[in-house]
Image (cartoon, rainbow, N blue to C red):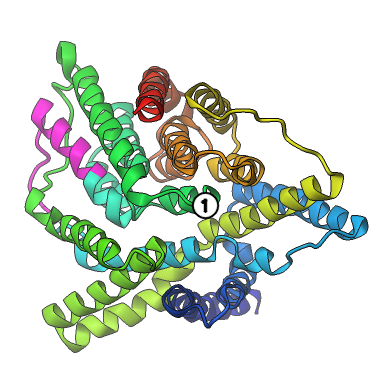
Amino acid sequence: MKHLHQWAAEKLAGPVLFLMAGLSILHGLYGSIPAYLAGGFGWLAALLLANTVNRVQRVQVVIMLLVGSGGLVWGVIAGTGVPFERVFSTNQAMLAMLASVSFLRLVTQPAICDEALPQGNRPLWRTLFGVHFLGAVINMSSIVIIGDRLSANRPMTPLQASVLSRGFAMAASWSPFFAAMGIALSNAPGSQLTTLSTVGFPVAMLALLLTGWELTRNGRADHFHGYPIQFNALWIPGLLAVMLMLLHHAWPAIPILTLISALSLSVTLLLLVLRHGRAGFGAYCQHIHIGLPRMSGELLLFLSAGVLATGIASALKASHLSVDVQTFGAGEASLLLLAMVTVSVIGIHPVISIATAGSILSPLGVDPNLLGITFLMTWAIGVSTAPFSGLHLTIQGRYQVNALALLRMNAGFALVMLGVATLAIHLYAGA
């Protein structure tokens, strides 16, 4: 009976999440529908899916809810105006984007290739850039698609795992379809997608070039088995990125997350129907019922982060505590980056540190783009190194790659990228 109830809850959660995405898009387009309504459906889905979240994420969620709730209670006791609607509305647009982007895997997954895996330096480069640009649009699905192929006939090696983790994680520094961008835009109000992506993209490309150089020198990749990806499979991600930029330029008043959500849902449905007719529409509906409930981990993390951010803001207001930040320039941003990456490595998800920093610094009038860039760099470097990030937990659990081996492979890379990100922050601030 318990399993039956859980099955029913998961079946119901998908349509609820789809409704959340639709309400969020309508709010972004017209504003007549309140944001907290979409957030309320997000919380309903979270309750339905609470039992599907793994233990590590469950602990993080509970901690964020306790701290955030404590801040809200403090605000109520102190008699300050506590914006309870923000508990429901914070991060709703970003969650709608995540749900909508998940549909893109239906039209961007490369065909399964039965040929033998190519071997050597060139396949490593192709795998590295392939997982990066594919992951920039379809997110974690790219890790599963490519990882399953690499490990089909032999265990995944730490070298292969390092290529996947670095290539994928660095997309967080620029991709508008990545959860990191939604978090950065939400927690650094006023930041601009074009500015964040313009700074982040060169950083990501340099990271890939450094990774390829490091992992192919001295014959390290001679026995590397790579993914036989065909780069013509990447035309849809490229088209979507161009369409997004054009739409954002034409209608700058529409929130960028709303554009991403609407574009992802509509383009996917159009391509599926054109390619497969009624069967394509069936696949779209199937994803609503089966695919959307799989985002339970992100759903609970980001909803809880919204409670945390609202609670911290409420507690700061109730305590009349003023954070004395005279200036927030490149130096301060670099120190914040180092601190947040460090706590990511020890197990604190970047969404927690970003929500905390955003709730403290955003009201102080700091440069939102500088803050947003710092958040993106934190996410990209943090998840590529942190043993408890969703990326590494997936690689460890699905492909039995030793956590310490992967950490050793990426530790030096993280230190180098901290230097690169710091340089990028200083170049932006000095421009």
- Picture quarter with the N terminus: bottom right
Residue 229 percent location from the top left of the image: 12, 47
Q: Is residue 319 left or right of residue 431?
A: right
Give the residue type at disc 1.
Pro
The answer to whether residue 120 is seen in the rendering is no
Type of secondary structure dominating the magenta stretch: helix
Looking at the picture, does residue 298 appear above or below residue 3?
above
Left or right: 307 as drawn, with respect to 108: right
Q: Residue at x 12, y 34 (%)?
A: 123
Q: Is residue 117 magenta?
A: yes
Disc 1 element: loop
User: Between 278 and 92, which is closer to the camera in this rendering?
Assistant: 92
Residue of label 1: 189
Rendered position, 318 above or below 366: below
Q: Residue at x 55, y 45 (%)?
A: 351
Looking at this view, name the residue that lies furthest to the top.
218
Question: In the shown orientation, is residue 409 left or right of residue 215?
Answer: right
Q: Position of residue 325 (x, y in %)?
A: 66, 30
- Magenta-colored stretch includes residue 76: no
Magenta stretch?
Answer: 113-132
